Image (cartoon, rainbow, N blue to C red):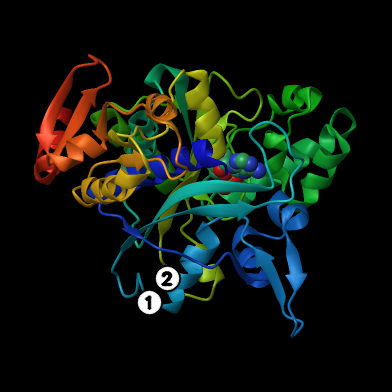
């Protein structure tokens, strides 16, 4: 990440720190790589991520390790290992950092990409689903994505009571329509039939439009949970679109799944964030039943969406004040003055290359300095500096000893 992008990343992580903190989330950092099993168990062997996108390697002792392809598995592994959501307590955690997937690179899809994510462990209530969805939408709003360019898609994937029978119906449907579906979807019939809803092939999309929907066969508990999530979203005015064919790419989801898509700037990779509930994930790791849910949002795609909306979040920080030295004799005084201004909390720049006064002014202009403190031998002899306002071109004098106060009051 070059500085413009890195500044945008810092802006987004700071926004997340502030906003997620207000929702009661605490930061967590998990390792960039873990035992491969952490990901295969949690995410599921039959998912695209595990079956073809992981960067897996052996270390010097022959252990199989994998660069993390997503954040939830590591967070849940850590929570179990350290008892963060033990015995009926709950944990609200967020992370930010790089993820790695061996995908076909294109606009908005890279092999190392950056995510911010949040997880709630130990919470079963539908109001928590609505809370975390609200947080995701508010985050995108806070960084500057206009509400009218975002669509929140919502669905329920059911649970172990209603999904197996539904999965079988989709499998049968795929087997019946096999000839009209791509090879990959045919393969999915046995490994992961619901993923056929995610196929981008237009013929498959058309065929799957007639496939049975889980919405019509949710068990009573899942249907009530889903209705309650929607009621809670209505209460806080979060608009959503029901998307009965939304299945997300990870095996661990149960009940609520959601995705935020943008209408501008991203083409086919238009999902900027998404997540869902994963009530069985902790048990996959051998832990006690611990309902959980979370989301992850993609930094690069969010940035593309912001660019499309004309929002610049990576603007260079402006220099408040430039300290110019008229000649070599006064350079130490300029050096000290810049240091004092910085110590007092102002953004100060100065020249280290003995440039002419004219080029120092040019540089001050380039850096966007609002003031230039000019230090010259005559002025210094009388204990004074000149302060030039770069907008009005007005020049005033100040005592060397008072320069910090004088600059601060002129900056307002
Ligand atoms: P997922 O972990 O697949 O649910 O993805 C969550 C978010 O991460 C997506 O909505 C994207 O914004 C982002 N994302 C996922 N994969 C990639 C990728 N390969 N490159 C860039 N962003 C990605």
Where, quadrant-wise, is the N terminus in this rendering? top right
Instruction: Residue 312: give x, y in percent of width and height.
Output: 44, 25
Name above or below for residue 29 compared with residue 300. below
In which quarter of the view is residue 217 placed?
Answer: top right
Q: Nearer the viewer, residue 170 or 338?
A: 338
Q: How dense is the environment of label 1, judged by Cα within 10 Å: few (below 14), some, or many (20 and up)?
A: few
Q: Find residue 79 and name its label.
A: 2
Can you name the residue that lies furthest to the top here? 392
Q: How dense is the environment of label 2, judged by Cα within 10 Å: few (below 14), some, or many (20 and up)?
A: some
Badge 1 is on which residue?
83
Name above or below for residue 107 compared with residue 117. above
Q: CA distance from mark 1 to mark 2?
A: 6 Å
Q: Nearer the viewer, residue 380 or 155?
A: 380
In which quarter of the view is residue 363 placed?
Answer: top left
Instruction: Residue 5: give x, y in percent of width and height.
Output: 52, 38
Where, quadrant-wise, is the C terminus in this rendering? top left
Name above or below for residue 121 compared with residue 34. above
Q: Which residue corresponds to the image point at 51% horizontal and 23% vertical from the top-left?
A: 307
Name above or below for residue 47 compared with residue 302. below
Does residue 169 appear in this view?
A: no
Q: Is 318 positioned to the left or the right of 98 in the image?
A: left
Instruction: Residue 67: give x, y in percent of width and height.
Output: 65, 62
Q: Which residue corresponds to the image point at 47% horizontal and 75% vertical from the top-left?
A: 287
Instruction: Residue 154: give x, y in percent of width and height.
Output: 47, 33
Secondary structure of the residue carrying tag 1 is: loop
Q: Which residue corresponds to the image point at 25% horizontal and 39% vertical from the top-left?
A: 377
Q: Nearer the viewer, residue 403 or 386?
A: 386
In which quarter of the view is residue 231 placed?
Answer: top left
Pointer 1 with pointer 2, Cβ within 8 A = yes
């Amino acid at each position: 990440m070059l500085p413009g992008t890195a500044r945008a990343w810092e802006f987004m992580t700071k926004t997340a720190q502030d906003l997620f903190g207000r929702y009661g989330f605490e930061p967590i950092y998990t390792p960039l790589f873990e035992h491969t099993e952490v990901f295969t168990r949690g995410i599921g062997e039959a998912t695209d991520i595990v079956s073809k996108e992981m960067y897996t390697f052996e270390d010097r002792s022959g252990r199989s390790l994998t660069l993390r392809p997503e954040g939830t598995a590591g967070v849940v592994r850590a929570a179990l290992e350290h008892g963060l959501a033990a015995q009926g307590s709950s944990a609200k955690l967020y992370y930010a950092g790089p993820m790695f997937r061996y995908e076909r690179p294109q606009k908005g899809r890279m092999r190392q990409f950056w995510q911010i994510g949040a997880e709630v462990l130990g919470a079963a209530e539908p109001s928590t689903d609505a809370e975390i969805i609200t947080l995701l939408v508010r985050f995108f709003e806070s960084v500057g994505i206009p509400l009218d360019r975002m669509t929140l898609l919502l669905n329920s994937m059911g649970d172990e009571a209603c999904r197996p029978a539904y999965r079988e119906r989709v499998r049968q449907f795929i087997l019946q329509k096999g000839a009209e579906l791509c090879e990959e979807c045919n393969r999915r019939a046995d490994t992961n039939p619901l993923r056929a809803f995610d196929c981008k092939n237009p013929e498959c999309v058309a065929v799957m439009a007639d496939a049975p929907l889980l919405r019509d066969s949710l068990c009573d508990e899942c249907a009530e949970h889903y209705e309650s999530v929607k009621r809670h979203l209505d209460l806080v005015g979060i608009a959503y679109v029901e998307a009965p064919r939304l299945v997300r790419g990870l095996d661990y989801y149960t009940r609520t799944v959601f995705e935020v898509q943008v209408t501008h700037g991203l083409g086919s990779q238009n999902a900027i964030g998404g997540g869902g509930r994963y009530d069985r994930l902790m048990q996959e790791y051998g832990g006690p039943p611990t309902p959980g849910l979370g989301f992850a949002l993609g930094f690069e795609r969010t940035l593309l969406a912001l660019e499309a909306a004309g929002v610049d979040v990576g603007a260079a920080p402006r220099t408040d004040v430039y300290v110019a030295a008229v000649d070599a004799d006064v350079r130490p005084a300029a050096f000290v003055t810049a240091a004092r201004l910085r110590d007092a909390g102002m953004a100060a720049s100065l020249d280290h290359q003995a440039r002419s006064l004219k080029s120092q002014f040019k540089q001050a202009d380039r850096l966007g300095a609002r003031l230039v403190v000019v230090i010259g031998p005559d002025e210094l002899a009388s204990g004074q500096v000149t302060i030039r306002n770069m907008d009005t071109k007005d020049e005033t004098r100040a005592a060397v000893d008072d320069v910090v106060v004088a600059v601060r009051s002129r900056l307002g």
